[in-house]
Image: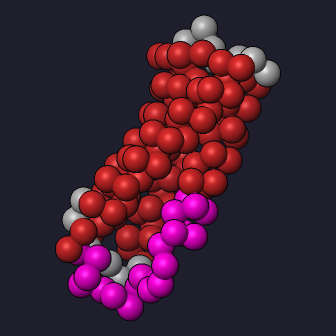
Amino acid sequence: MHLSYVVAVVAATIVISLSDWLFFGVLFHDRYDETPEVWRAGAEGPRITASTLSALVGTIAFFAIATALQVRGAGPALLLAVLVWLAGALPQTFMNTLYIKYAPSIGVSHSLGWLARALIVGLAYGVVAR
């Protein structure tokens, strides 16, 4: 694997962490307080670390899938990212919103957060795989 791929994976993981902060933490922050029984209490550091590791694993997996499919360029990589989001994250988030007691606006924010994750990794891949 080329160094450019490693740099792209690390950069995407960092940017994903920042987008997670926005979509999963900041947007509709007050709505989380409406259902405190749904959310785990305690130190957030270990959960943030686990989320970052999850982003790293997901980014590596996306790069592996895109490479196996011989995706080249930003356009096709972004299309793949949207399709992955539509096939996995969006339905899962929608189902969570149906069955878990939290505000629908949180479901929208989480869906957009997963889309941001997908687009970030798709763009990162597309930049290095031309």
* On screen, residue 17 above or below 73: below
In which quadrant is the N terminus drawn? Answer: top right
- At horizontal 26% and vertical 82% (from top left) the residue drawn is 33
Q: How many marks?
A: 0
Q: Is residue 130 left or right of residue 100?
A: right
Say whether residue 58 is magenta.
no
**In this view, which residue lies farthest toward the right?**
1
Give the image location of residue 39, x and y in percent: 42, 82
**Residue 41 painted magenta:** yes
Residue 84 occupies quadrant: top right
> Is 74 above or below relative to 57?
above
Q: Is residue 44 left or right of residue 30?
A: right
- Residue 66 showing in the rendered view: no
Pick the quarter of the image with the C terminus: top right
**Residue 2 location in percent, x, y?**
75, 17
Asked if residue 40 is positioned above or below residue 18 in the image, the reply reads: below
**Residue range (magenta):** 31-51
| Towards the viewer: 60 or 81 | 60
Query: How far from the left and from the top, in percent, is residue 6?
Result: 68, 28
Q: Residue at x 62, y 39 (%)?
A: 59
Q: Residue at x 46, y 49 (%)?
A: 17
In this rendered view, identify the residue nearer to me: 19 or 102: 19
Q: Residue 61 versus residue 13: which sits nearer the camera?
A: 13
Outermost residue to the bottom: 37
64 or 33: nearer the eye? Answer: 33
User: Residue visible at 47% across and 16% down?
Assistant: 75
User: Residue 106 vs residue 87: left or right?
Assistant: left
Say left or right for 2 vs 120. Answer: right
Does residue 125 appear in this view? yes
Rendered image quadrant of residue 105: bottom left
